[in-house]
Image (tube, grey):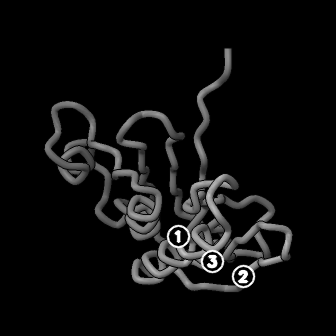
Amino acid sequence: MAFKLQVVFDCKDPEGLAKFYAEALHYKLQDPPAGYASWEAFLKEHGIPESEWNSASAIVDPEGKGPRVYFQQMETPKPGKNRLHIDINASGGSKVPLDMRKRQVNDEVGRLVRLGAVKDHELDEGRGEYCVVMLDPEGNEFCVQ
């Protein structure tokens, strides 16, 4: 039996990064626990100081297929290039003609830029593959392919 997978981001602003990736991945913010109308109501009832409310956040696939993505607040700066990154597969795959895949990737890149990402560079190695390396609002690398 396979284990369930959760992806964890160390970040400065869990709420902000969760909102970005919820939009980027077509996920949703995780619902508050049963019996609570909001996370704020849950945190208040459990005596969590307001200064700690942005210490964590999570997003989930609304269809329940993808992994939960958890964002935890860390004050340490990002040391350099990510050793792990996510790929957003927006092109439809290798069965789609390359020119159409490039259009689909670039349309998605435009949408992500409007959400707060930065286009870093393109990888077009002439072997029928195309990818755009992006930076999320905190500078973490991810790819759109």
Q: To which residue does mark 1 refer?
A: 104
How many residues crowd mark 2 within 10 Å: few (<14), some (14–19), many (20+)? some
Q: Which mark is residue 139?
A: none
How many residues crowd mark 3 within 10 Å: few (<14), some (14–19), many (20+)? many
Q: To which residue does mark 2 refer?
A: 122
Q: Which mark is residue 134?
A: 3
Residue nearest the viewer, comparing 49 with 40:
40
Q: Nearer the viewer, mark 2 or mark 1?
A: 1
How many angstroms separate mark 3 from mark 2 (CA)?
Answer: 9 Å
Identify the element where label 3 is drawn.
Answer: strand
The quadrant of the rendering that contains the N terminus is top right
How many angstroms separate mark 1 from mark 3 (CA)?
Answer: 15 Å
- Tell me which residue sits at (41%, 70%) in the image: 16
Mark 3 or mark 2: whose residue is earlier in sequence: 2
Residue nearest the viewer, comparing 26 with 141:
26
Q: Amino acid at mark 2?
A: Glu
Furthest-top residue in view? 1
- Tell me which residue sits at (65%, 58%) in the image: 86
| Quadrant of residue 121 within the rendered picture | bottom right
Identify the element where label 2 is drawn.
Answer: strand
- Tell me which residue sits at (56%, 85%) in the image: 118
Q: Amino acid at mark 1?
A: Gln
Q: Nearer the viewer, mark 3 or mark 2?
A: 2
Is residue 137 among what the camera can see? no
Q: Position of residue 135 (x, y in %)?
A: 61, 78
Q: How many marks?
A: 3
Mark 1 or mark 3: whose residue is earlier in sequence: 1
Mark 2 or mark 1: whose residue is earlier in sequence: 1
Q: Amino acid at mark 3?
A: Met
